[in-house]
Image (cartoon, rainbow, N blue to C red):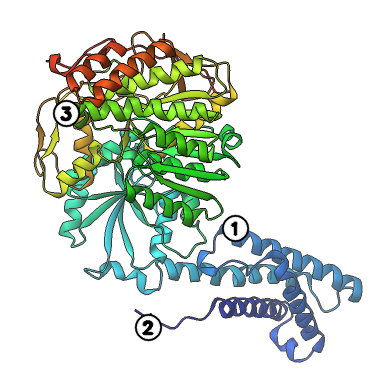
Amino acid sequence: MFNSKPHLPRGSLRSLGILHDIFVAALSMMLALGLAWNFQALTIYWQLWAIIGGFTLLSAAMFPLFSLNSGAWRYASLLDVVSIVKAVTAIVTLFLLGHFILFRGMFLPRSALVMCWFIMIVGLGGPRLLYRLSKERGFSENAVRPLLPGKVEHVVLYGFNDNADLFIRNARRSRPLTHIVAILDPQPKNWRRRLHGVRVVGDLSALATLTRKSELAASPVSQIIVTQTNLPPSDMSRVVEAASPLKLAIKRLPDISRAGGVDSEAPIDALPVSLEDLLGRREVDLDIREVAQLINDRCIAITGAGGSIGSELTKQIAGFQPRRLLLIDNCEFNLYSIGRQIAAAHPEIATIERILDVRMADRINAAFQEFQPDVVFHAAALKHVPLVEENPVEGIETNLLGTRNVADAALACRATAFVMVSTDKAVNPANVMGATKRAAEAYCQALDLAGSETRFMTVRFGNVLGSAGSVIPLFQSQLQRGGPLTVTHPKITRFFMTIPEACRLILHAAGHGVANRTERGRIFVLDMGEPVLITELAERLIQLAGLRPGVDIEIRYIGLRPGEKLYEELFGEGETVETTGREGLLAASSSVSDTSFLRRNFEVLERAVRASDAPRAVELLSHIVPDYRKAEILDEPVARPRPQAPVLPPAQ
């Protein structure tokens, strides 16, 4: 739709502003001389008009030096007033000195300059502030729009701070208009204060009363906006809990630096609160400067490149400008998708896409011999615990023998580094998936301790928010169907992290491991903070949808699945927890069998897999991983004391 109201182009508006300032300069000196002499003197002495003309020319020449018209009048502020005062003071002082030197001050009373100084400041600053006031709330149609039903969204702000000030001023300029009903703040000292006329009515306990009053006034509140950009997750959870029963949408302001700033004409749009905002841990922003030296101008191979972790990992690696990317996946569509994304974002990088299965050792080895990757990131795996429990042969062949195949191929082509993506389910495993990952970890540790040119590193972390097959997409699909949300056990907990954070950890571990070649055979683990109760996760997801857990949407407990534990662990009983000198990054060291023992067992295991003998394959797997307890004998989740991670020293 076209705007029916005509608008002058910005260049014309700026020209009008310049003409206004010049006119004000001339008018100020004329009024000052008229008041000092009398206005009849202006009709008698031509010298007075010469003074007015000279002062006007000097002002026109000096205004640009103080950038009086470099900004928009609608954003006029105290800083603009300060610039006006500086400009007028400089102009009056310079004109006084010049006139005294040239004409000994004839026809120019000193009182006239003082009056000119005051008149000029008011003349330059007053219209600017009045214009801003009219745009924000004073005389424009925006002032009456909150009174028009059905055209305004009524919101409540949470937080009395600079961001609230910015948002209110921006909202009053933007269209469609957002009407700020009130502000809530947890600090009693701010109650009953006002910000641009909007009153702070109390803390979150006042929200219910406020929404009822707004409904009676025909201005129903539709959402609450959190103004603090770094509000702690616990405080954000309290906002969600308070807003959910009232069916209010919960949003938060973005980082001001990404919102366009105060001088932007674009409205600042509040963002929906996500589950990441409610996690009870701070996302660790790892230092990945070492990664550039590892990846830049080299050939990088990524298995499982089209998966949740693999695709994000590929995107982050591409940002370090490798010479070539070898993308490997057995899913045609996933490989096609990530290939197109990299081609669009980084057309300068040579990308090779290969539909390969890591279970086929000869084909993986042939690809590595052809392209000679310098660094290999192994993210291909079967990760869904119940499915792998029902299909143990496929899980063993992919997660264990597949890892062996890729690791051996990396060793054969003398790659600089091999990085395996592992999981916390490998710690004291209670299912086939976890046991296969632990066996794969042991093989990589053994190869690394063998002292080859290739560094073999393992990265272990917890559940990844939003990854394919994880609990969040399941909850979201159940929520769309109207519930119930299914949780296996009321006390079940899990560690969570975001996909970008997981990939930063993988890259950081790779760079750190290659830079510290003496630290061999260690498993890198992210300090993931406290585990999250899955029931609480389900409740928060329901509340974010503006619904009430147990009232609008049921949470149903369906019982633990085979091999499932109440909680996951990041370190095993026999593992030694060590620091790496990097904030948020730990390492686990454990006793490892030698490669010859593991290879012999893998060969026997491979024969059982080829024969599709699942019981024999699982039995051999438990021999390789003594900590593995078979799912069928688990009446209750394994409960073992959790090793305590050391307190990290401050980052150096």
* Residue 219 in picture, x, y percent from top left: 21, 61
Mark 3 vs mark 1, CA separation in Å: 69 Å
The quadrant the N terminus occupies is bottom left
Q: Nearer the viewer, residue 282 or 176?
A: 282
The residue indicated by pointer 1 is 79
Q: Residue furthest bottom?
A: 43
Earlier-in-chain disc, 3 versus 2 = 2
* Residue 33 in picture, x, y percent from top left: 73, 79
The residue indicated by pointer 3 is 390
**Tags 3 and 1 touching, CB below 8 Å:** no
The residue indicated by pointer 2 is 4
Q: Going by the image, does 250 lie left or right of 94? A: left
Earlier-in-chain disc, 3 versus 1 = 1
Mark 3 vs mark 2, CA separation in Å: 65 Å
Neighbour class for label 3 at 10 Å: few (<14), some, many (≥20)?
few
Relative to residue 328, is residue 496 depicted above or below? above
